Amino acid sequence: MGFQQHGITQQELRLEVERLHRELQEKDTQLKLINQVGSMLTSELELEKVVKKVIDIATKISKAEFGAFFYNRTNEKGEIYSLYALSGAKQDDFSGFPMPRKTAIFGPTFHGESIVRSNDITQDERYGKNKPYHGMPAGHLPVKSYMAIPVISKSGAVLGGILFGHPKAGVFQEYEETLVKNIAAQAAVAIDNANLYGAKLEAEQRKSREQISTILESITDGFFTISNNWVVTYWNQEAERVTGRKRGELLHQDLRDVFMNPSLNGLYKKLYLAQSKYKPVSFIGYYSVFKTWLSISAYPSEEGLSVYFKDITKQRHAEELDHLGKKVLELNIKPDSDLKDTVNYYLRGLERIHPGMLCSVLLVEGGCLYTLAAPSLPNYFLQAINGVAVREGLGCCGTAAVKAKKEFSIDIGADPNWEELNSITTRANLKSCWSIPIISSTQRVMGTFAVYYQEKRLPTPEEEHSIESSNNLLQILLENKTIEKALRQSNERYDLATAAINDAIWEWDVLTDKIYSGPVFEKIFGHEAREDEHADIRISRIHPDDQRRIEQSLHKAILATNVDLWQEEYRFIKKDGSYAHVLDRAYIIRDSNLKATRLVGAMHDVTEAKTYEVERELLIEELKQNNSDLKQFSYITSHNLRAPLANLLGILKLVKLDAIIDPMNRKLIDKFNEATHKLNDTLEDLLDVLIIKNNNGLKLEHIHVQSSFEEVLKSIESLVQESGAKVSVACNEAEYAYANPSYLHSIFLNLLTNAIKYRSPERDLNIKLCTKHVGKGIEIRFSDSGLGIDLKRYKDRLFGLYQRFHRQENSKGIGLFIAQAQIKAMGGSISAESEVGVGTTFIIQLKK
């Protein structure tokens, strides 16, 4: 009743209570949202998320139909631009409209001057004053109620503005303005924090990008990135080196447009596969546009592809070269392999690995060059150099073979070394050459390995490495074939030699106790030559009387670590039952512990020698007796002749030729006198020889050689002076000889008088005596520049009795015979070196 007195009906009261209740609920919701704003904003540091949360909460609190938060942001270049976030409306609703300008309505907000709140913005005097729309553009969401609050940081900078709209008029009241103003203040703090975080994050990201860029520039791999539409976004230094294209040429360009080479089609297909399947790919390929083998890995991402690649040309070439080398060595060890075919195969492989190389191998034989292999060089070129004498100036190969070091010519047409072959090289279009001598382990030039190019250039580092490696392999091939040939010839000679010397070669493996016998064993003894005969079988064939002695001797030699040679004689039974006398010699091979492991020996059948030895002993005894009888006969003859000869000489002294009147008688007496004296001289010579030959008690002593020689010189001083001879003596190295003084005097006298007697009338006579130590003795060399002796004619008769080599009236031909006899009697020897028209050297060897 009281309400009725105030004119308020119960219905109106109920409605008013409901309104107030709704307002309280709305304010309660607004307060709850306000309470959430602080925690929501302080927990977020990403600017876009902060802005979105602010506009969403503020739109709800303000009861707006839609809201927009326009805010400013600075890019990497320091430029400011505006972004916006929406709430209560779709992005498409505003995408066709320009950003709000600082007009009379928007200006206070974006200048940070004041809050703008209007119950109906379309009725505001500031509305519709600006071109081109003079209000809201067509299609704009309907707006009556309008409220805009600037967002200002603590520094006073305007961060942006929050704009609200509603199609009904009078929605935004002072209360909503206060709430949103509070949110704007908190938003300013949150945006400042987000900007600080963003700046820090951007700095860290920039530093990280710089570090990544530094790493990508320093890695040995090439690296580039492309977007999903193949635009190059990064290109490092190694990529520049490998491809030869600078970063500036490629950035922001389509990779396929920059490298429009057919050889890269396979690369593009694999990159497309990685991109389309979103799967990493790795592959290896040769790209002729870069002349390079590349190992490539591509990794897809949302932005595009990251591609790593490595230049593996060296590794690839090394692998191919290694594989080729192994294949060639396998071919080379085959029994029927041919060196020419093997080297040709190798050179073709090299030319495949290094396109543009033309290879050849020439052999040096007998001082000439011969083609072994040159698969890609024309025949007319090879024929021009085949068989040509090795000499400096014959291209790179001839010069390399002479100098034994590598030679190269970067311009064959202008190189004097190629002048002789210029027409041929021009015809073959050969512009450059690199040649290396193939030198054996004994430092002998076996051949040359050459590489030609049909352009003026030197080998690349990879090619040069291959050339050096190939030269080493070619040395092995050539030397192995040389050794193989020598070994084959050696084996043939060995077989022929063992057959010729008639020795049965055997080898005993001590560890297995098995004996191998060569084919001559069967030929000599008749037993089968086996490779695994047990040692007991061999021992059983030794004569029973010799068996124990031989076993003991072998056992002793095997156990004695300082014994390497074993030798014994014994009787060995043949297959026919007869015994052969055998001289068996063996070399004992020992391991590192000096334990005998093998014996290699040769059995020599000395049966004939044994028979001969017995016969020889009998013959020696017979000769001794005959020699004794002959000496006795010589003494008797010389004694019996000497007395009547002395009588004849005495009678001849009594005969006076002047008293004989008859000329005929006088002539007969004269001739008789001459013959008697010659007979006497011969007898004297024979007696001298017999004395020397039978002087077993000859006394020897140490004689000063130079003093002995100078005594002889003094005794014939006038003869030496008369001849004009120049005599030099050099006996300082070996001064003393163990000899008989009289014999040595006689020898020097013989040699000196012979040198003077047989001097050349065409030149001065030079005589030289020198000595030196030889082993346990002394060598005396007597040289003259006389007529010389024809040793081809007189060698075997040089020291014979009564041998004359020059037409000299008073030559008897006994001097050298007596000298040799005297030297032999002293235990020495004499030999001669001579050349007609030059002179003679006698070499005497005596004991010290």
Image (cartoon, grey):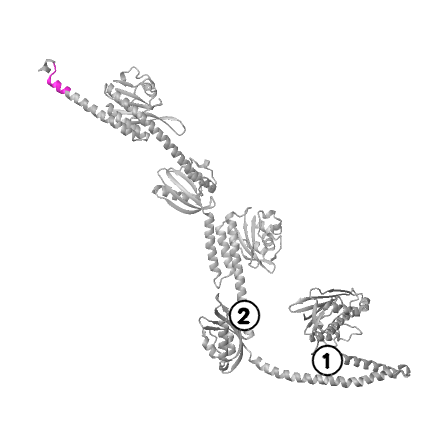
Cα–Cα gap, marks 2 and 1 = 50 Å
* Left or right, 759 with reference to 257: right
The residue lying at 45 percent from left, 50 percent from top is 316
Residue 679, picture quadrant? bottom right
Q: Which residues are magenta?
A: 7-16
Q: Which mark is residue 690?
A: 1
Residue 254, picture quadrant? top left
Q: Nearer the viewer, residue 208 or 838?
A: 208
Q: From what the image shows, is residue 280 above or below residue 618?
A: above
Q: Could you tell me if the residues under marks 2 and 1 are in contact, i.e. CB atoms within 8 Å?
A: no
Q: Position of residue 543 (x, y in %)?
A: 50, 81
> Around disc 1, counting alpha carbons within 10 Å, would you say few (fewer than 14), some (14 to 19), or many (20 or more)?
some
Q: From what the image shows, is residue 160 above or below residue 848?
A: above
Is disc 2 placed on a helix, strand or loop?
helix
The residue lying at 72 percent from left, 78 percent from top is 692
Is disc 1 placed on a helix, strand or loop?
helix
Q: Which residue is mark 2?
A: 494
Q: Position of residue 690 (x, y in %)?
A: 73, 80
Q: Nearer the viewer, residue 551 or 734?
A: 734
The magenta stretch spans residue 834:
no
* Left or right, 681 with reference to 441: right
Which of labels 2 and 1 is toward the front?
1
Q: Amino acid at mark 2?
A: Tyr
Prevailing secondary structure class for the magenta stretch in the rendered image: helix
In the picture, which quadrant includes the N terminus? top left
Q: Nearer the viewer, residue 337 or 49?
A: 49
Q: Amino acid at mark 1?
A: Leu
Q: Which mark is residue 704?
A: none
Q: Position of residue 65 (x, y in %)?
A: 24, 24
Q: From what the image shows, is residue 169 above or below residue 328?
A: above
Q: Is residue 143 visible?
A: no
In the picture, which quadrant includes the C terminus? bottom right
